[in-house]
Structure formats: structure tokens, C-alpha cells
Image (cartoon, grey):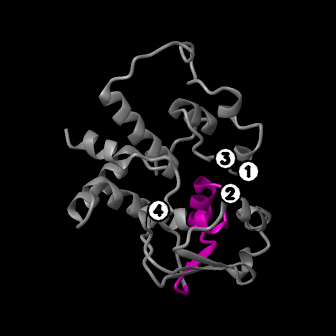
């Protein structure tokens, strides 16, 4: 499957905000956007007038990069959100939040969504007692995720669980740290998504 393999910090600088793509590094002074808060490239420090379309495009790119989704898949999520009842922009965010790899990250088993996706791909987790190795699986209320017995000594996972306090766990999820288990207590609501996202700009972009 195609995926972005370039430098993650470059994406944060391009979007002008922290996307938390590199785990614990993003919380330290080594974070690229804290050191160089302007876009990458030769003309990054120049003054650029951004059109309304440009603002909408950047918002879409920001959300796409936060969740590590490629363009065609992201548009597919938007079309699904548009067919659902409720507010399209919020529906889009809820679909992205309910991805299995995002839930693994949110529970603290991984330091980043990229790492969470890799753990899922390598079958480190079960979902309701069954092997789950597809990152895009949509979880639902009542689902139980658990780290497989053979994976409980993986250093990166135990380190991430120790550091999850810094990031916090959303209220719609519950972590049983000693049992290496997480439960989806309810569906996410807009208040659970704390990243600075203006989803209405994405709706306006795709509605043109």
C-alpha cells in the first residue's frame, strides 16, 4: 500500500502547526516547528498571500497528514461522512477517530499513529478476541482491544504506555494498563478531538 516515506517534521512545518507525528520528540525542544516555525524550502520565510482556496486546502492537508491518510482514501471518508446523518465535517472526524490504528495510538500503545499502524499490520493486537491486522477497521462502542501475550515485552509498546499520561486518553476510551487492554466505551464526540481542526473548511473545499 502506498504511504508517505519522507521526513515527518517537514509536514509539521508545512502546515504551520504540530501534528505530533514523531511521538515523544514532538514534546521536546527538538521539535522542528519549535526551532523553525516557517515552511520548508527556499521561499519558506517569504510573505505569501493565501487565498480562501489555499486556506481550505491547507486544512484538508493538515487533517490528512495527522491521520496518515492518502488523498483517495481521505476523499472516500468524506463521501461516507456526507451520506451519514448529522454534520458532515464532524462525521468525517469521527470516522477518522474510529480507525483501529488511531484507537491504538489514543490508548497509548504507540507513540505515533504511524507506529500504531505498523503494530496493527504486524498482528500485535486482537479485537474482540480475534486477530486484527487492518488499520482502517472502524471500531464501535463495546469493542475490546488487547495486546497479544507474545507482544507484551516489546520495548516500544511498554515505553509508550509509560508516557501516555503526558498525552491523556479521551473519555470515550478506557485503558486497563496492567491487562494491556482497551475498551471503546462510547462513540467519540467533537469535544474529544482536541487538535486545532476547522472541519468546515474541508467541507467547503470538497463542496466546490
Residue located at (57% from left, 13% from top): 42
Mark-to-mark CA distance, 4 and 3 = 24 Å
Q: Which residues are magenta?
A: 104-129
Judged left or right of residue 182, residue 95 is left
Mark-to-mark CA distance, 1 and 2 = 7 Å
Q: Are marks 4 and 2 in contact (CB under 8 Å)?
A: no
Residue 49 sits in quarter: top left
Residue located at (42% from left, 67% from top): 189
**Relative to residue 170, is residue 81 depicted above or below?**
above
Mark nearest the camera among 1 and 4 is 4
Estimate how packed mark 1 is, as few (under 14), some (14 to 19) or many (20 or more) residues with alpha carbons within 10 Å.
some
Mark-to-mark CA distance, 3 and 1 = 7 Å
Estimate how packed mark 4 is, as few (under 14), some (14 to 19) or many (20 or more) residues with alpha carbons within 10 Å.
few
- Magenta run includes residue 119: yes
Q: Are marks 3 and 1 in contact (CB under 8 Å)?
A: yes
According to the picture, the residue beneath numbered tag 1 turns out to be 24
Estimate how packed mark 2 is, as few (under 14), some (14 to 19) or many (20 or more) residues with alpha carbons within 10 Å.
many
Q: Are marks 1 and 2 in contact (CB under 8 Å)?
A: yes
According to the picture, the residue beneath numbered tag 4 turns out to be 191
Residue located at (80% from left, 64% from top): 155
Residue 111: assigned label: 2
Mark-to-mark CA distance, 4 and 2 = 22 Å
Nearest the viewer among 141 and 114 is 141
Amino acid at each position: 500500500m502506498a504511504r508517505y516515506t519522507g521526513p515527518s517534521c517537514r509536514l509539521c512545518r508545512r502546515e504551520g502547526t504540530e501534528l505530533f507525528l514523531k511521538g515523544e520528540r514532538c514534546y521536546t525542544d527538538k521539535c522542528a516547528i519549535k526551532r523553525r516555525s516557517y515552511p520548508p524550502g527556499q521561499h519558506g520565510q517569504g510573505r505569501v498571500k493565501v487565498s480562501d482556496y489555499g486556506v481550505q486546502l491547507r486544512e484538508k492537508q493538515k487533517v490528512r497528514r495527522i491521520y496518515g491518510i492518502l488523498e483517495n482514501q481521505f476523499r472516500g471518508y468524506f463521501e461516507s461522512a456526507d451520506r451519514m446523518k448529522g454534520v458532515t465535517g464532524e462525521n468525517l472526524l469521527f470516522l477518522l477517530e474510529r480507525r483501529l490504528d488511531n484507537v491504538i495510538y489514543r490508548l497509548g500503545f504507540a507513540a505515533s499513529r504511524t507506529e500504531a499502524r505498523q503494530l496493527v499490520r504486524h498482528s500485535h493486537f486482537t479485537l474482540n478476541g480475534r486477530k486484527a491486522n487492518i488499520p482502517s477497521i472502524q471500531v464501535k462502542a463495546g469493542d475490546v482491544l488487547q495486546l497479544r501475550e507474545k507482544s507484551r515485552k516489546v520495548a516500544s509498546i511498554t515505553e509508550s504506555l509509560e508516557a501516555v499520561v503526558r498525552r491523556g486518553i479521551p473519555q470515550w476510551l478506557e485503558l486497563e494498563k496492567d491487562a494491556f487492554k482497551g475498551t471503546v466505551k462510547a462513540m467519540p464526540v467533537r469535544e474529544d478531538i482536541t487538535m486545532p481542526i476547522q472541519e468546515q473548511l474541508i467541507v467547503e473545499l470538497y463542496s466546490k
